[in-house]
Structure formats: C-alpha cells, structure tokens
Image (tube, helix red, strand yellow):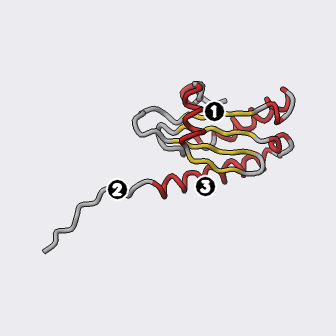
C-alpha cells in the first residue's frame, strides 16, 4: 500500500498528468509522468484500470500488483511528480515480473525524455576579453 501522502486521488491531477505529462507505453501499461513547476509536495502515484482489463477481481489484482511495484519507485521520483499508470488489457495476463519490468522501463523512458527537455542549469557567462 502506498502511504497517503503519495496517493493521487484528485481528478484534476489525473487529467493534467495524462494530458500534459510525458508518456511511454508497453504491451501491458502506459506510464504518464508530469512534474509541475509550482508545487512543493511529495511525489504522488495514481492508477487507471478500466473494465477492458477484466472483471472486478482481475482489475483489483492488477491494481494491487501495480501499487506494490510503484511503491519501489516512489523514492526515485522527483519532488512534486505526478505519476499515472494506466493498465492495458494485456496486464490481466501478465506476470508480476513482467509488470515490474514494463513499469521500470516506462519510467526510465519518460524520465529520460523529461531530463532531455529540461534546460541545463544556468552557468555564468565567460568574460570575453
């Protein structure tokens, strides 16, 4: 279980993360990562598991697995990050290890894209002489 401070529960944050954030997909899931500039709070994680994944028992099993896997990655997320993990229908048949690999790979891809898109820290200009 994720600690309450790391749970994403408001619809606006889900919407912003899925629309404004970076995304990376795999066969079993899609990872959305959004890092707001003006908010100072711990990273938060939310999950979207639609009825296309399966019946209620299957959806809850997928959510439990994803919550447990995401707990391992929360500490590596930048402060105020909003992570949304959307399960695809293939997640219902995927093993725990396969979900873990897809989550880790997706996070690495979106973090790489975000890091590449952020400007370098401001360095002092050299004095021209």
Q: Secondary structure at mark 1?
A: strand
Q: Secondary structure at mark 3?
A: helix
Which of the labelled discs sits on residue 95, or is there none? none
Which of the labelled discs sits on residue 109, or is there none? 3
Q: Residue at x 16, y 72 (%)?
A: 128
User: In this picture, is 27 found above or below 62?
Assistant: below
Q: Position of residue 120 (x, y in %)?
A: 38, 58
Quadrant holding the N terminus: top right
Q: Position of residue 44 (x, y in %)?
A: 56, 34
Distance from Cα at disc 1 to Cα at disc 2: 30 Å
Report crowding for label 2: few under 14, some 14 to 19, many 20 or more residues within 10 A (C-alpha).
few
- Left or right, 58 with respect to 79, comes to right
21 or 42, which lies in front?
21
Distance from Cα at disc 2 to Cα at disc 3: 22 Å
Q: Residue at x 12, y 75 (%)?
A: 129
Question: Mark 2 = which residue?
Answer: 121
User: In this picture, is 30 found above or below 14?
Assistant: below
Distance from Cα at disc 3 to Cα at disc 1: 18 Å
Question: Mark 1 = which residue?
Answer: 46
- Left or right, 53 with respect to 23, comes to right
76 or 25, which lies in front?
25
Ranked by sequence position, the earlier of labels 1 and 2 is 1
Q: Residue at x 72, y 38 (%)?
A: 66
Report crowding for label 1: few under 14, some 14 to 19, many 20 or more residues within 10 A (C-alpha).
many
Q: Are marks 1 and 2 in contact (CB under 8 Å)?
A: no
Q: Residue at x 85, y 33 (%)?
A: 54
Ranked by sequence position, the earlier of labels 2 and 3 is 3
Q: Toward which corner of the image does residue 96 lie, by quadrant?
A: top right
Q: Position of residue 26 (x, y in %)?
A: 73, 51
Q: Are marks 3 and 1 in contact (CB under 8 Å)?
A: no
> Which residue appears farthest toward the left when viewing the image?
129
């Amino acid at each position: 279980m994720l600690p309450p401070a790391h749970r994403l529960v408001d619809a606006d944050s889900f919407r912003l993360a899925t629309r404004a954030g970076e995304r990376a997909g795999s066969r079993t899931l899609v990872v959305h990562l959004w890092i707001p500039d003006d908010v100072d709070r711990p990273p938060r994680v939310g999950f979207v598991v639609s009825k296309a994944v399966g019946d209620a028992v299957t959806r809850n099993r997928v959510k439990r697995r994803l919550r447990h896997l995401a707990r391992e990655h929360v500490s590596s997320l930048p402060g105020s990050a909003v992570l949304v993990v959307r399960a695809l229908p293939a997640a219902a048949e995927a093993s725990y290890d396969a979900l873990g690999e897809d989550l880790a790979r997706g996070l690495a891809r979106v973090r790489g894209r975000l890091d590449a898109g952020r400007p370098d820290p401001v360095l002092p200009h050299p004095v021209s002489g």
